[in-house]
Image (cartoon, rainbow, N blue to C red):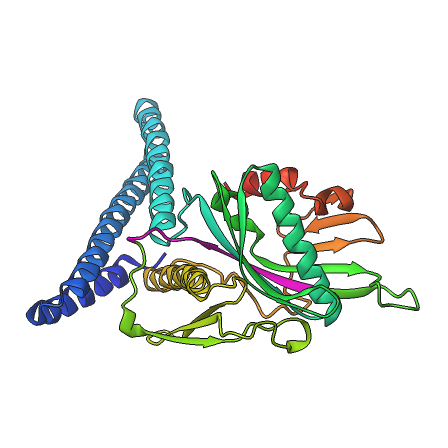
């Protein structure tokens, strides 16, 4: 968390910008700036409260270090206990507030997941396919709905990348901790000498925004249509039904080619783009407010891992909580309940 002076300085910048924009009557921008101003006001109020509690704790500690009277010492000790409780509550409220404004969207019932093959060539693409199947089966167990938004198959049936939506109660809160680089160690089906290979796939988890969270101006979009491609890059459609959308102000790109209907592909690509914009906005707010928020999707290098799936030893290890589970076959068939449960407990 940044210092109170830095937060007040950021709020002042918003106020100055608001004065300039009010003269232009750009009501959409005015609304966004006023919303930002309210966020800063709330943070300043909560931070000032925390600092006041800390000041009171220091004053009580001075009494405890200097006072000789037993009765006064007893009162000071009780007061310190109460102040520590107040500080704990204030810190918890601050953490919860920052979580909400950083766009975590814990109550979201829809989540967009992107899986990309990383290091390891065709084996990485096959692993990306295995991860998609694992999440699809987990969604089925949870009675959630799964819909593929975009995908690029390889000749051996893997995925270079796949984007899909999962909808159902607590979908985001359950899936959010799957974001990161996943590593697999196994003997590929293409390996003739029986050597163990290491490959990676990266997973990004994006909350699907509601209609009011992300608003996109039509003039800010560049929409390109092209023919859907299959394994090896060959065109699988005579008509240009695939859609690629570029958000000009940010440079963010989303595409969809899975539907035979161009309009449906456009809707899918827009869903992905809106989720990416919501995540970017959350990152920017976190940076301004001084909170730490790691990028979800890395460059899929072997060292940047959150989890390892070791098939020869029949074990899965989550490196964030240093915990190992066995029976990979059951896990890859959607048996993620214990793993997700322990991650939620550890991060709560």
In magenta, the rendered stretch is: 200-212
Residue at coordinates 58% horizontally, 52% vertically from top-left?
178
Q: Majority secondary structure of the magenta segment?
A: strand
Relative to 3, residue 345 above or below: above
* Residue 298 image point, x, y percent: 56, 67
Relative to 284, residue 164 above or below: above
Considering every residue shown, the one lying at the far left of the view is: 23
Query: From the viewer's perspective, is 114 left or right of 232?
Result: left
Query: From the viewer's perspective, is 339 left or right of 59?
Result: right
Quadrant that contains the N terminus: bottom left
Residue 6 falls inside the magenta stretch: no
Foreground of the two, 276 or 230: 230
Foreground of the two, 169 or 224: 224
Considering every residue shown, the one lying at the far front of the view is: 238
Q: Is residue 342 visible?
A: no
* Residue 63 image point, x, y percent: 31, 36
Determine which quarter of the picture holds residue 102: bottom left
Query: From the viewer's perspective, is 55 left or right of 155?
Result: left
Residue 211 falls inside the magenta stretch: yes
Query: From the viewer's perspective, is 86 left or right of 19?
Result: right
Residue at coordinates 63% horizontally, 54% vertically from top-left?
132
């Amino acid at each position: 968390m940044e210092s109170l002076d830095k937060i007040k300085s950021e709020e002042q910048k918003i106020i100055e910008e608001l004065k300039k924009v009010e003269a232009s009557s750009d009501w959409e921008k005015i609304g966004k700036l006023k919303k930002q101003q309210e966020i800063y006001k709330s943070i300043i109020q909560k931070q000032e409260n925390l600092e006041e509690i800390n000041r009171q704790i220091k004053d009580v500690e001075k009494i405890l270090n200097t006072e000789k009277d037993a009765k006064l010492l007893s009162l000071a000790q009780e007061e310190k206990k109460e102040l520590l409780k107040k500080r704990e509550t204030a810190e918890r409220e601050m953490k919860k507030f920052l979580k909400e404004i950083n766009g975590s969207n814990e109550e979201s019932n829809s989540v967009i997941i992107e899986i990309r093959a990383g290091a390891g060539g065709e084996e990485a693409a096959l692993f990306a396919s295995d991860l998609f199947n694992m999440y699809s089966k987990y969604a089925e167990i949870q009675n959630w709905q799964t819909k593929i938004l975009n995908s690029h198959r390889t000749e051996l049936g893997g995925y270079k990348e796949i984007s899909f939506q999962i909808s159902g109660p607590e979908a985001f809160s359950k899936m959010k901790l799957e974001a990161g680089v996943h590593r697999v160690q196994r003997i590929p089906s293409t390996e003739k000498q029986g050597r163990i290979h290491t490959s990676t796939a990266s997973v990004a988890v994006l909350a699907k925004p509601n209609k009011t969270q992300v608003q996109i101006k039509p003039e800010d979009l560049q929409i390109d249509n092209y023919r859907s491609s299959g394994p090896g890059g060959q065109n699988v459609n005579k008509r240009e039904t695939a859609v690629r959308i570029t958000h000009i102000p940010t440079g963010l790109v989303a595409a969809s080619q899975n539907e035979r209907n161009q309009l449906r592909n456009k809707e899918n690509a827009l869903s992905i783009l809106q989720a990416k914009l919501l995540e970017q906005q959350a990152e920017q707010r976190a940076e301004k407010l001084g909170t730490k928020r790691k990028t979800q999707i890395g460059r899929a290098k072997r060292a940047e891992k959150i989890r390892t799936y070791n098939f020869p030893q029949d074990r899965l290890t989550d490196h964030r909580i240093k915990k190992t589970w066995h029976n990979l076959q059951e896990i890859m068939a959607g048996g993620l309940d214990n793993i997700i449960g322990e991650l939620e407990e550890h991060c709560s």
